[in-house]
Amino acid sequence: MRTALVGAPIDIAALVAEVSAPANGALSLFIGTVRNENDGRTVDGIEYNAYAPMAERELAALAREASERFDTQHIVIEHRTGYLALGEASVAIAVAHPHRVPAMDATRWIIESLKARVPIWKLEHYTDGTRQWVVQGHSAVQGSAKMDHGEDPHA
């Protein structure tokens, strides 16, 4: 098992290789990418910020909990921080297991739990030059006011 916050592009092939083993008959992979639209607004990038010490602890806790729930040690979770352009992978979760159902269930459980528990925030950058913090897929601040680059919605 391994978890990490990373500042460089996620190497998907390396994650797959890391969880692969002869005993595993299934490998489930989730890749979250930056899309070009949210809540009807055109997005041209996202900046991910994290409270790193807590985020790293929570990611590790998620991997341990998933390992116990789904009976596998073959879990890797990586989440990007910093500015990401359209199409870049923001999060990748690879889970391997002897059987497909536990591998797929673990992957879904991890991403849903990560969204709820890990202190990672995203600042969407829009094509009109504005930016907004987003919480659970919805804009945290309504309107089109420009925000300071480092402004934190939780301050």
Image (cartoon, rainbow, N blue to C red):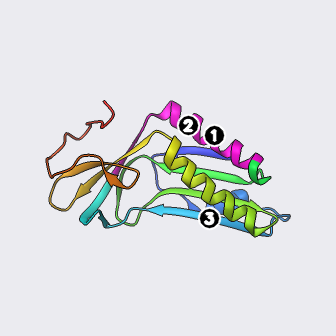
Residue 92: image location, x then y, percent = 55, 57
Per the model, the C-alpha gap separating discs 2 and 1 is: 6 Å
Q: Is residue 133 above or below residue 97?
A: above
Residue 146: image location, x then y, percent = 15, 46
Checking the image for residue 29, the label placed there is 3
Checking the image for residue 56, the label placed there is 2
Q: Earlier in the sequence, mark 3 or mark 1?
A: 3
Q: In the rendered structure, which amino acid carries the disc numbered 2?
A: Glu
Which residue: 36% across, 66% down? 35
Q: Secondary structure at mark 3?
A: strand
Residue 90: image location, x then y, percent = 45, 56
For label 1, the residue is 60
Which residue: 61% across, 45% down? 3
Q: In the rendered structure, which amino acid carries the disc numbered 1?
A: Ala
Q: Viewed as shown, does residue 128 lie left or right of 53?
A: left
Per the model, the C-alpha gap separating discs 3 and 1 is: 18 Å
Magenta range: 47-68
Q: Secondary structure at mark 2?
A: helix
Checking the image for residue 108, the label placed there is none
| Closest to the observer, 58 or 46 | 58
Q: Are marks 2 and 1 in contact (CB under 8 Å)?
A: yes
Q: In the rendered structure, which amino acid carries the disc numbered 3?
A: Leu
Residue 56: image location, x then y, percent = 55, 37
Q: Residues within 10 Å of mark 1 (few under 14, many from 20)?
A: some
